[in-house]
Structure formats: C-alpha cells, structure tokens
Image (cartoon, rainbow, N blue to C red):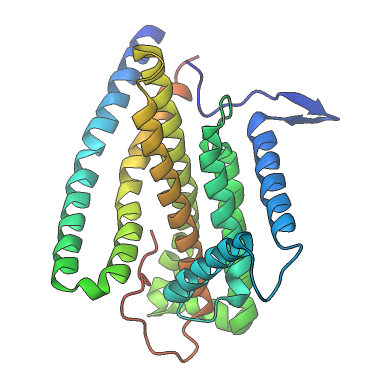
Amino acid sequence: MNDLIQAVSIFSAALAVGLGAIGPGLGEGRAVASAMEAIARQPEAAGTISRTLFVGLAMIETMAIYCLVVALLVLFANPFIK
Amino acid sequence: MKSPLTLEPLFHLGPVGITSPVVVSWGVVAMLGGLSALLTRRLSLIPSRSQEALELLVTTIDSQIRDTMQSDPAPFRALIGSIFLFTLASNWSSLLPGVEPPTAHIETDAAMALIVFVATIAWGIRVRGLGGYLATFAEPTWAMIPLNIVEQFTRTFSLIVRLFGNVMSGVFVIGIILTLAGLIVPIPLMALDLLTGTVQAYIFAVLASVFIGAAVGERGRPPPSGAPQGATK
C-alpha cells in the first residue's frame, strides 16, 4: 500500500509542477510582451514600466512557486506515507 | 535525497539547536555590519572612493523607496535597505563553496516576512492612529472587511513562499544537475541563480515598501501614476 502511495505521490508531484507551470508561463509571456511594446512606444517611461513589470512578474511567478511547494510537500512531507 | 523542508541541528547552544542557516545568517549579519561600520568610520565632505560607492547605494535605495511609496524615504530607509541588503547577501552567499543560502530554508524567509508584517501594522497605527488604521480595512466598502483581513495573511504567506521557492529551487536544480552531469556543467545555472537572487531581493524589498506604503496611506498626495499600488497578492 505504501509503495502505491509513493508512486502516486511522485506522479502527482510531476503533474503538479508540469501543469502548474503552463499558466504562469503564458501569463509571463504576455506581460513581458506588453511591457516591451509599452517601452518601445514610450522609452522615457522605461524605469516605471520595468519596475512594475518586475513586481508583476513576481506575482505571476508565485503561482508556479505554489505548485512547486505543493510538489515538495507531496514528495517530502507527505502525511499519508508512514 | 535530502528534504529541503527539514533541518538537522549542527550543534547545541544550551537547549537550543543551532542549524546551518542560522550560522550563515550570523555570518551575513556580521559581514554587513562590519562593512558598514568600517566604511562609515571616516565620513568626509570630500568623499573617498568607498564612501562614493556607499552613497551611490544609499541614494539608489532612497530613489526606489521614493518611487514606490511616493513619500520621503528617510523613515523607511533603515528597514527596507536592511531587508534588501540582507536578502541579497544571503542569496549570494551560495557563491562561497560549501555554503547554502539561508533563504533556501523557509524559516529565514518566515522570520523576514513576519518582520514586514509587524512593521506594516506598526507604521499603519503610528501614522493613522489605531482607529484610522482599522478603518482602512473597511475601504472601499464594509463588505470588503473579511477579504482585507484574509489578504493581510495571504500576502505575508506568499512573501514567504516566493522567496523560499525561488532560492530553494535554484539550490535544488544545481544539486540535481551536479549529480547527473558533473563538475563544470551547473555554472551557467549558478549565474542564473545570481540574477534570480538579485531580482528576488529587489522584489522582497519593493513588496515590503508597497505594503508599508499602503498601510501608511496617501496623506493628501496626488495619486501616483505608475507605482504598483494595487499589487497585493
């Protein structure tokens, strides 16, 4: 039974990170593309735009990091493995 | 494989177990403190090279705080600057062989995020008064009160997890590549880690100033056009 739970845990950890990275990846791509466009249109606002961009990217990236933490919990701190 | 979530104490100081991140962060604090004491010992009006570098750093931090909070950076310089420098030095401490950055363990990040959490409440109460600070929870309407209270905790939690996840995943990936490929191969990833460490230190400091700035409030200033005021998650 424990072996089965371990196998399922490893599979679900991979699934969590793999699927969870799709959304933030797409989102970050869109954010960076819009920021590039904005900087190209208004180069004098580059400082403000890039600062806001970095903070926004960190927000988006947090979603992927959450998935990573869930995967780590499943792998290393799984409450169902004795 | 060693779990990144658990820690073994290195040695015991009385009943208290001392782990390696604690020792490394002591080293970082001693280095930063010693360096600042050394560099500010002989300040003069005609600055030497080291004083110029230090002034450049402080002015940069000041201008970033001013841009984010749209107010005078003097009262916040000590907290935000220390957070930035400590996080940066901790993230980069992995450059020394055999040292694991203390921010790769969740306890260090939790300690720093708790400092930010307490500082946010303290500044809010100090500037607006207790009633005024509690009234900000009812903005824009009273129906937002539960959400605003939950937000206080979730944003602190995401502050912890963001720094922990980024730094820890860097350490983890380097470890895995090292076991799979060998000695020289992880060097580009370590260079990427330096970039991630800088960006995360910057983001931690910016988010701390955004939170404190939101608690302190506008105080009659014109609304900032580009500052990330709505950034809360």
Q: Is residue A74 visible?
A: no
Q: Is residue B157 above or below residue B228?
A: above
Quadrant where the C terminus of chain B sits is: bottom left
Residue B22 position in % (x across, y down):
68, 36
Q: Nearer the viewer, residue B46 or A78?
A: B46
Q: Nearer the viewer, residue A29 or B90?
A: B90
* Horizontal relation, residue B214 to residue A31: left or right: right
* Horizontal relation, residue B127 to residue B68: left or right: right
Q: Nearer the viewer, residue B153 or B220?
A: B220
Q: Nearer the viewer, residue B97 or A31?
A: B97
Outermost bottom residue? B220
Residue at 43% in and 56% down = B203
Residue A15 position in % (x across, y down):
25, 27
* Horizontal relation, residue B226 to residue A74: left or right: left
Image-quadrant location for residue B67: bottom left
Residue at 28% in and 25% down = A14
Residue A35 position in % (x across, y down):
20, 62
Q: Is residue B209 above or below residue B92?
A: below
Image-quadrant location for residue A32: bottom left
Residue at 37% in and 85% down = B223
Image-quadrant location for residue B185: top left
Outermost right residue? B14
* Horizontal relation, residue B2 to residue A2: left or right: right
Residue at 86% in and 30% down = B14
